[in-house]
Image (cartoon, rainbow, N blue to C red):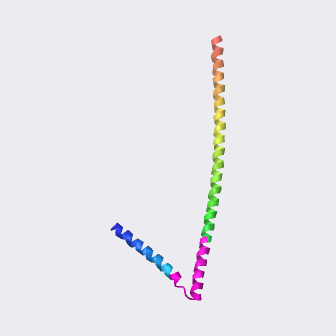
Amino acid sequence: SAQIADLQQKLLDADNGDRAKQRWDSIATILEAKCALKYLLGELVSSKVQESKLQSGLQQSQASYSDVQKMLMEERNNIAEMEAEFQNQILVQEQQHQEKVNHSSWK
């Protein structure tokens, strides 16, 4: 039954495609041509509006991506600085501890 439903849908799609083609092929008068042209221009305008919206969305997404990349790099730099400072503090603590150990062993 799934195959039958699939074949029926394919037949409907093919029939709709044929109807549209026949409709365009059957334009015989100037009035029909004007109506068809008006429809096509409307579709063109609609497509251009959609393209513009998508382009704007893409630009906004690219700007957001760029901002996130910048923030990520700043955070990585901050982490690297904090890690270097932490390592330095560990070194200072180890040196102080070693000095205490050496100093107490001389007593």
Residue found at the far left of this picture:
1
User: To which quarter of the image does residue 78 belong?
Assistant: top right
Q: Residue at x 35, y 70 (%)?
A: 4
Q: Is residue 45 magenta?
A: yes
Q: Residue at x 65, y 52 (%)?
A: 67
Q: Nearer the viewer, residue 77 or 51?
A: 51
User: To which quarter of the image does residue 88 belong?
Assistant: top right
Q: Quadrant of the N terminus?
A: bottom left
Q: Is residue 43 magenta?
A: yes
Q: Nearer the viewer, residue 12 or 49?
A: 12
Q: Which percent across, then down, holds residue 94?
A: 63, 24
Residue extent of the magenta highlight: 23-47
State whether the magenta stretch is mostly helix, strand or loop: helix
Above or below, 39 relative to 55 = below
Q: Residue at x 62, y 53 (%)?
A: 65
Seen in the image, is 13 located left or right of residue 44?
left
Seen in the image, is 78 located left or right of residue 27?
right
Q: Which percent across, then down, holds residue 58?
A: 62, 60
